[in-house]
Amino acid sequence: MQKLTNKEEEIMHILWKLEKAFVKDVLEEITENKPHYNTLSTIIRHLEEKGYVGYTAYGKTHQYYPIITKEAYRKRFMNSAIENYFNNSYKNVVSFFANEQKISVEELKEIINVIEKIIKHGLFS
């Protein structure tokens, strides 16, 4: 799975939301920095070349749909970020968010409770 640019990722979020869309439908969903129709069409074709998007042809127009699920992309993205920026350590991830004050003690306690429930029910591998 090739890495996506910020704009490609934005387009993927729109396609995940819409499930199926023509270029004009995607364009309508973009609120800031709206690209020209032809530019957007090129971006979507690049997503297709990268294997993220498929299409159904209706004459000369195409209706696009995501091939990769949002969950599969999230998993790949998170695993890559944790590996590349946190030495493959989830402890380092949590420490980072704690140091940045992006996570509270209460949220950390909730995370521990979730992990304990998962372990108790044998769902943790």
Image (cartoon, helix red, strand yellow):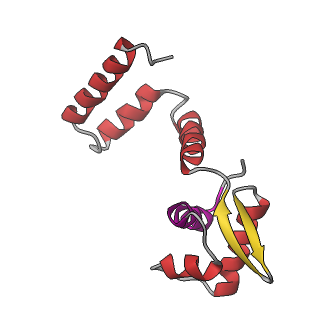
| Left or right, 82 with reference to 37 | left
The picture places residue 84, in percent across and down from the top left corner, at: 59, 38
Residue occupying the point 37% across, 33% down: 94
Span of residues in magenta: 4-18
Please give the name of the residue rendered at 64% of the width and 79% of the height, measured from the top-left corner.
23
Q: Is residue 75 above or below residue 46?
A: above
Residue 7 spot, x, y in % from top left = 59, 68
Q: Position of residue 71 (x, y in %)?
A: 54, 45
Q: Viewer-proximal residue, 8 or 67? A: 67
**40 or 53: nearer the viewer:** 53
Q: Main secondary structure of the magenta part?
A: helix
Question: Residue at coordinates 27% horizontally, 43% vertically from top-left?
Answer: 101
Residue 80, how many percent across, how many down? 60, 39
Q: Quadrant of residue 108?
A: top left
How many marks do you count on the picture? Answer: 0
| Residue sitting farthest toward the front | 58
Residue 50 appears in view: yes
Q: Give yes or no for residue 13 being in the magenta stretch.
A: yes
In the rendered structure, the answer to whether residue 119 lies left or right of residue 83 reads left
Q: Is 116 included in the stretch rendered in magenta? A: no
- Can you see residue 33? no
Residue that extends furthest to the left in the rendered view of this protein: 106
Q: Is residue 93 above or below residue 71?
A: above
Q: Is residue 121 left or right of residue 12?
A: left
Name the residue nearer the viewer: 122 or 1.
Answer: 122
Quarter-wise, where is residue 45 in the image? bottom right
